[in-house]
Image (cartoon, rainbow, N blue to C red):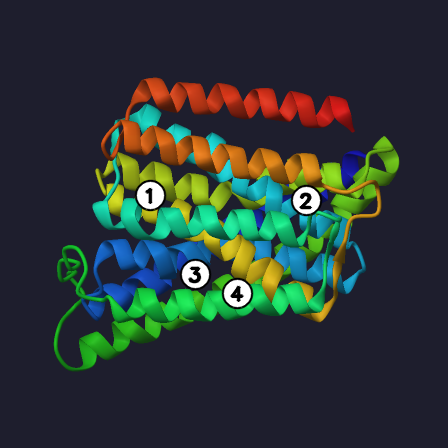
Amino acid sequence: MIVSILVFLLGVGLLVGGAWLLIGGGTRVAAILGVPSVVIGLTVVAFGTSAPELFVSAVGAWKGSTALVLGNVIGSNVANLGIILATAALIRPVIVERGLVRGEFPLLLAVSILFAGLTWDGELSRVDAAVLLVIFVGFMYWTLRDTGRGAPQEAPAYDAPGGHMVRAIAVGLAMVAGGVLGLAFGGHLIITSALDLALRLGASETLIGLTLVAVGTSLPELATTIVAATRREDDLAVGNIVGSNLFNILAVAGPVGLYRPLREAEGGVAFQLVTMVMLTVLVFVMILVGRGALGRGRGAALLSIYVAIMIVWTSAA
């Protein structure tokens, strides 16, 4: 068991390192092109921090562990709201961009409800997955079309004419490639060790996905959000969380479910799905009541709720 734990931790380290390379490279290229920070948060950073969930889920589906995949998607979305958004609010009160309140957050709520409905019977079929993928394509088109939104990124120091800009872009793309390799290998190690731990502990794949794997694959979101919060980049921090949750459902469950239908064999995930939706509703209400602000008190409440959720999920397994 000790070897499995060490392998799991090594996999998490590769995931975090790979995600950081992917985020750093993608953000570098996007900043050179003058893309607004909220759009970077919703796309480049959200994809980079959701890449661990995608790679872990892809490996899980390839190995036939689809229950772990479902648990990972649900658990990661709950962790993003209950740990990561809460941590950002605890560091300093978070001001949510008006466009997120009016656009992406209601979309996240609608997508969460749709996902819950599609997987209520414990299965996400290929047709269901195709629906999610189509919505993802529409979301990306809508987001990228609105590139004039928010304040543009300040030109970075390496944004110079001629060869310097070409070299900066080349470095960014090399970082992206290295990040993908780290994510792929890290995902393989995490799935292998998680399945071994589930077998040794007598726990279900779903529970391991909801807890251990979900928290492990959410570490890039946590690190990114902490950095963004300390730098007072609220658009990037909240955009990352909302975008990551949308990506987890649409761009992780979608393509992976299209490759292999996701099935929960141990009695369904209805309770966990309800928990995910209700937590999303609660966060949205908190933001609306706070008129776009999420203070330390609400952050502490979210973190306490997440702890309670974990206690209930593990005791009910």
Identify the residue position indicated by label 3 in the image: 22
Q: Earlier in the sequence, mark 3 or mark 4?
A: 3
Image vertical order of residue 93 relative to residue 167, above or below: above
Residue 144 visible? The answer is: yes
Q: Nearer the viewer, mark 1 or mark 4?
A: 1
Q: Position of residue 166 (x, y in %)?
A: 25, 79
Residue ID at (78%, 29%)? 317
Circles 3 and 4 in contact, beta carbons < 8 Å: yes
Image vertical order of residue 267 relative to residue 89, above or below: below
Which amino acid is tagged 1? Val
Which amino acid is tagged 2? Gly
Residue ID at (63%, 50%)? 117
Check disc 3: other Cα within 10 Å, few if <14, some if 14-19, many if 20+.
many
Q: Position of residue 259 (x, y in %)?
A: 70, 70
Which amino acid is tagged 4? Val
Identify the secondary structure beneath mark 1: helix
Marks 2 and 4, how far apart at CA: 23 Å
Q: Earlier in the sequence, mark 1 or mark 4?
A: 4
Residue 182 visible? The answer is: no
Circles 1 and 3 in contact, beta carbons < 8 Å: no
User: What label does residue 238 carry, if any?
Assistant: 1
Identify the secondary structure beneath mark 3: helix
Q: Is residue 139 left or right of residue 237?
A: right
Identify the residue position indicated by label 4 in the image: 180
Residue ID at (72%, 26%)? 314
